[in-house]
Amino acid sequence: MKICRFLLSCAVLCSWCPPVWAQVAEPVRAPSTTRAAEDVPWTLSLGVGASYETNALFTPLNPIDDYSNRLNGGISRSWRLRRGGASFFGTASQVFYKDVSSLDGLRYDLGGTFSHALTRRLQWAGSGTVSSGLARDARPLTDTGVLLPSVTTRSSSASSAFSYALSRDSQIDWTLAETGVGFASSTLNGGTSVTSTASWTTRVGRSQTIGATQDYSRTFRENDATDIYGFLGTWALTTGQWTVYASGGLRPYTVPLLDGFRFSGAFAAGVTKPVRQNQTVGISYSHNVEQTFAVAAPTRLLDTVSGNYSIALLTNLTASVSGTYTHGKSTLFPELKTNAQIAGATLDFRPFRHLSISGSATYYSRLEEPIARVTGTTTIVSANYVTSW
């Protein structure tokens, strides 16, 4: 426990950042040291919005549809420094429901980043977020295929990453990350996860890289703690039109109430490609062992398929669609299986320099055998005034 507390303290002291879950770790690129310092102005947004939700509570019994109004606000600032950079952002929405007043409240996202070139070869970067919103929109949960009823969820994450250039074509990276999740409802238990990731990558030819990654993750919940290790090989190809990656390896892991280690293969692959001018499509698949919170069997084998498509219809009009399907199976009780789907579409229109009109629609679906499937939708329309100085 003393070692775990030390790791947690290091993550918090270094900085805040999203958890490192990707099997192919993105290398920390060196900030430019030749460019003069340059600041990006403050950006402020204020607006109003309205939404309609089917099954607003996201429960299998007696679904309730409801309308809501919201007040939106946001602010951001970034700086380019001689040896790195810094930035922060904050967004908030005060939501008022017509009938389901228990969902009224303030939802927010706060975050910041900082990077610094310690030497010509050694770089450091840290960043992170603090968020409050509904459980079905919390990334630490949805990324592991968990869609919970509509309860207020608060999450935070911290990360510190070092990158050292061994040569012009090779580098090593080490990242320490922490993620915490908590719930307003006493019936759901949150927890904390700590992850350490070390990787080596080298360029092969003009457009390919290969590498190796070793990671370790320990998750603490109310009554137990579990471990997951990873030993992976990585490959990536980047050309003018294609970005392709793949990884594969072995993951030893522990299961609550059982002694010793279990083993599972882990692999992932994905591709992103511009299909036409101003259009981009991407698709990915992964098979992995994940730890999560607020479920009876927190350590699960997950298969995830996701895709996205974006298009710039006009210079001031953009649209995108995305979808994710996750199939999970408990490592302790194999008969416990879950299926989760999230699909969404967004449209953003800037008719004037300081005015942004946006709309989004999201579909949620959860199936936990033998419980009946739960579905719900959220449609939001908003108008925001945006200015910079």
Image: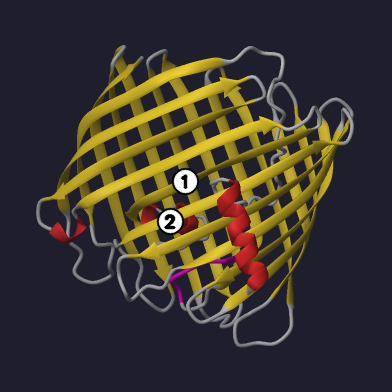
Q: Residues within 10 Å of mark 2 (few under 14, many from 20)?
A: many
User: Which one is earlier in the sequence, the residue at label 1 or at label 2?
Assistant: 1
Residue 35 appears in which quarter of the rendering?
top right
Residue 338 percent across, percent down from the top left: 48, 69
What SS does tag 2 mark? Answer: strand
> In the current view of this chain or complex, which residue is farthest to the left?
98
Count the marks: how many? 2
Q: Residues within 10 Å of mark 1 (few under 14, many from 20)?
A: many
The one nearer the camera, 111 or 307, is 111
Q: How is the image coloured?
A: secondary structure
Locate the N terminus by quadrant.
bottom right
Decide if residue 64 is in sight here: yes
Residue 147 percent across, percent down from the top left: 40, 62
- Residue carrying label 1: 129
Q: Residue at x 64, y 61 (%)?
A: 7
Q: Is residue 116 magenta?
A: no
Left or right, residue 10 beside residue 340: right
The numbered dot on residue 224 is none
Decide if residue 289 is in sight here: no
Q: Which residues, given as a range, are shown in magenta?
A: 289-295
- Residue carrying label 2: 155
Q: Residue at x 23, y 57 (%)?
A: 56
* C-beta proximity under 8 Å, tags 1 and 2: yes
Residue 315 appears in which quarter of the rendering?
top left
CA gap between label 1 and label 2 equals: 8 Å
